[in-house]
């Protein structure tokens, strides 16, 4: 069905649009025109968007859906339902499922499951090494043909630098992107919080900043050696993003992302052993948070992601060090990014760029923009809506978030995928 989105304020950072414009979508689900209806266009449906922001559907570079293997935490169906309610129309699924996404069959299974629901598109990230063991390389060429948009060893470090070099050479030969969680496992040891004043006060084993910077330094040296295109995930320290900025100035083909929660929380939010703040990498110092925020403005960081990790309630009931790390974060991705606009760190177009076309460029897919002919993946939200995050408002199966009780601004009212309305706020 053809439709018109009428009266909304369109923000499309990729095409430099920031104005009140109507959008016309043809019956095949593509943008037919912006501003003025094409000749002979008749809308079968009209969406009134007066007072709302209309933007490309959000692109999330990292969200664990727990299926297959951990369906007691969440499922593909439950999490893509939560994603469209959050305005996310495309997301990437890391390979640390059970079994691992290290074969074309697994990659295709994830995608076919998502297609059945007709909601958020899922693009799998393939395993860098077989079974994520860091020993034998996965068949990246076959995984690429099966639809994987990047390759990573997820949170399991490849400790053998020669194996990592060979993996990067393989990826560079095929012009593939390697997603890196840079961390020195020996420096990390058994730490669970940032090595700082809070960890020392609580008696919790710390993870020094050097665990991240040492990992980044090794990987940058190998990127320079191999010419591999690489994306650094989950950076948490000011020093690490400074190293990425320096590498970019040297011309290395690197990009980086940061999670929304690392932009708002620090080690002090752990309080008295709040396991909802147990994340990996850990929440770091106030100075580190300041450095991450500065990197958004300078362009050293290219995207903000959710790093969504839903858990069952029991996973967070253990003592802090034994609790499972991770935050259920799909539904706070947009509001927490808008909070950066409220704090005058970013303009609204700059903030939305970090959630739309910039992450899309990292995975090499022509989405995250609404030019004429583009697929009509669209997020419509009320920028003035203020709401309190409570458990009953969370659609994801995982309710593990430290933002419970926070007042948030910005509520998604409609989400369209391929021109089809897949979510509407009641």
Image: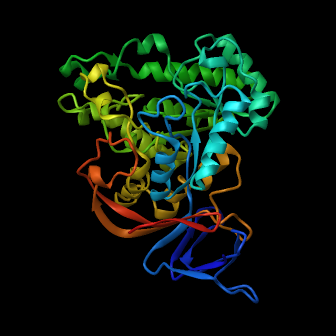
Q: Nearer the viewer, residue 357 or 49?
A: 49
What percent of the width, then of the height, locates residue 408? 31, 58
Q: Is residue 231 above or below residue 349?
A: above
Q: Residue at (48%, 14%) from the top-left corner?
A: 185
Q: Residue at (46%, 34%) from the top-left corner?
A: 71
Label count reads 0
What percent of the width, then of the height, locates residue 258? 48, 40
What percent of the width, then of the height, locates residue 7? 51, 83
Q: Nearer the viewer, residue 396 or 182?
A: 396
Say left or right for 384 vs 357: left
Q: Quadrant of the C terminus?
A: bottom left
The quadrant in which residue 178 appears is top right
Q: Residue at (24%, 34%) from the top-left corner?
A: 268
The quadrant in which residue 180 appears is top right
Q: Nearer the viewer, residue 325 or 256?
A: 325
Q: Is residue 136 above or below residue 182?
A: above
Q: Is residue 115 above or below residue 279?
A: below
Q: Is residue 79 above or below residue 184?
A: below
What percent of the width, then of the height, locates residue 249? 64, 38
Question: Can you see residue 254?
Answer: no
Q: Quadrant of the N terminus?
A: bottom right
**Among all residues in the image, which is located at the extreme right?**
173
């Amino acid at each position: 069905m053809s439709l018109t989105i009428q009266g909304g304020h369109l923000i499309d950072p990729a095409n430099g649009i920031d104005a009140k414009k109507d959008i016309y979508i043809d019956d095949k689900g593509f943008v037919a025109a912006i501003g003025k209806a094409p000749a002979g266009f008749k809308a079968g449906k009209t969406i009134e968007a007066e007072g709302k922001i209309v933007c490309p559907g959000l692109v999330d570079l990292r969200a664990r859906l727990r299926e297959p293997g951990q369906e007691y935490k969440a499922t593909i169906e439950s999490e893509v339902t939560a994603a469209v309610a959050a305005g996310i129309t495309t997301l990437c699924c890391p390979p640390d499922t059970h079994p691992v996404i290290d074969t074309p069959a697994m990659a295709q299974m994830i995608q076919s499951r998502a297609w059945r629901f007709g909601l958020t598109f899922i693009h799998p990230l393939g395993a860098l090494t077989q079974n994520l063991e860091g020993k034998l390389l996965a068949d990246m060429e076959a995984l690429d043909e099966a639809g994987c948009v990047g390759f990573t060893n997820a949170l399991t470090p490849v400790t053998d630098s020669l194996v990592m070099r060979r993996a990067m050479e393989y990826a560079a030969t095929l012009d593939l992107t390697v997603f890196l969680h840079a961390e020195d496992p020996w420096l990390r040891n058994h730490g669970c919080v940032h090595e700082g004043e809070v960890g020392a006060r609580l008696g919790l084993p710390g993870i020094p900043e050097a665990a991240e910077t040492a990992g980044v330094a090794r990987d940058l040296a190998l990127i320079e050696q191999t010419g591999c295109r690489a994306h650094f995930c989950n950076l948490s320290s000011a020093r690490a993003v400074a190293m990425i900025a320096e590498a970019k100035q040297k011309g290395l083909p690197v990009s980086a992302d940061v999670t929304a929660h690392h932009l708002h929380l620090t080690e002090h939010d752990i309080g008295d052993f709040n396991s909802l703040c147990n994340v990996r990498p850990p929440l770091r110092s106030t100075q580190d948070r300041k450095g991450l925020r500065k990197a958004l403005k300078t362009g050293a960081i290219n995207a903000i992601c959710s790093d969504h990790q839903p858990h069952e309630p029991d996973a967070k009931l253990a003592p802090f060090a034994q609790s499972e790390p991770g935050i259920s974060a799909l539904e706070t991705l947009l509001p927490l990014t808008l909070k950066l606009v409220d704090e005058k760190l970013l303009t609204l177009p700059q903030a939305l760029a970090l959630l739309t076309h910039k992450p899309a460029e990292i995975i090499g897919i022509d989405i995250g923009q609404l030019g004429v002919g583009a697929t009509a993946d669209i997020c419509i939200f009320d920028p003035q809506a203020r709401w309190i995050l409570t458990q009953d408002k969370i659609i994801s199966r995982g309710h593990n978030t430290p933002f419970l009780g926070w007042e948030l601004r910005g509520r998604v009212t409609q989400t369209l995928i391929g021109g089809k309305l897949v979510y509407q706020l009641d």
